[in-house]
Image (spheres, rainbow, N blue to C red):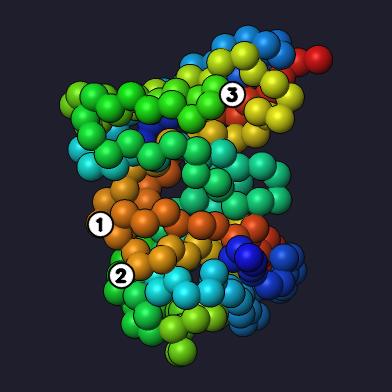
Amino acid sequence: GQQLNQSPQSMFIQEGEDVSMNCTSSSIFNTWLWYKQDPGEGPVLLIALYKAGELTSNGRLTAQFGITRKDSFLNISASIPSDVGIYFCAGRRDDKIIFGKGTRLHILP
Amino acid sequence: GAGVSQTPSNKVTEKGKYVELRCDPISGHTALYWYRQSLGQGPEFLIYFQGTGAADDSGLPNDRFFAVRPEGSVSTLKIQRTERGDSAVYLCASSLTGGDNEQFFGPGTRLTVL
């Protein structure tokens, strides 16, 4: 079963607002990943984190790998309509990727 | 270049029937993965191929599920005696050589068992 706890489950925000979502695990991962999934598509990798404490940015996205290796957060600044979708945190263990349940982002007009 | 493709995009079948789902990975990728995504959940790992061999099949839920990759490229996920609980989106991903290489996902096959 799933080992990652992702929160919040869903978010409703206004366009232009900043977004923050996080993920915790009961066990250590050596790599944390953040994906976005649009309807009818597979997940697409946004950011990969490899070192405890690492802070990485990709455009308006920023993610951090927790020092304990058991948590991570993703921030999205100045949200735009195309940010709508489901965001998954994931940890890599051996060759498997273990996904959280996702955070569904809605942007209000 | 083409990404990972999966066929069919949708499959509706009756309980007890046999189904095959096909995955065409990115050309040259030696590693191929199958995941299952139930409604409202994240993808769950099923099986990983390195070349022609299944390197890790620990995620297959039971012996009704089987996957092959006979020539190290296209893979087929086979489900026997389908049950309503098998209804889900089945995702395929490939990566260049496995390990820390990025896994690129296909759009999935939505399987509905009536």
- What residue do we see at 33% from left, 43% from top? A91
What kind of element bears circle 3? strand
**Pick the front one: A64 or B28:** B28
Residue beneath disc 2: B56
- What residue do we see at 29% from left, 33% from top? A25
Residue B54, placed above or below residue A104? below
On the rendered structure, is B83 left or right of A109? left
Mark 2: amino acid: Asp
- What residue do we see at 58% from left, 74% from top? B24
The chain letter for the residue carrying disc 3 is A
Quarter-of-image position of residue A18? top right
On the rendered structure, is A78 left or right of A90? right
| Labels 2 and 1 touching (C-beta < 8 A) | yes
Q: Which mark is in front, 2 or 1?
A: 1
On residue A94, the disc is 1
Mark 3: amino acid: Ser
Mark 1: amino acid: Asp
Does residue A99 appear anywhere in the picture? Answer: yes
Residue B52, placed above or below residue A86? below
The chain letter for the residue carrying disc 1 is A
- Discs 2 and 1 carry the same chain letter: no
Residue B90 rendering spot, x and y as whole percentages: 57, 62
Does residue B36 appear anywhere in the picture? Answer: no
**Pick the front one: B63 or A92:** A92
Residue beneath disc 3: A10
Residue B77 rendering spot, x and y as whole percentages: 53, 76
| Labels 2 and 3 touching (C-beta < 8 A) | no
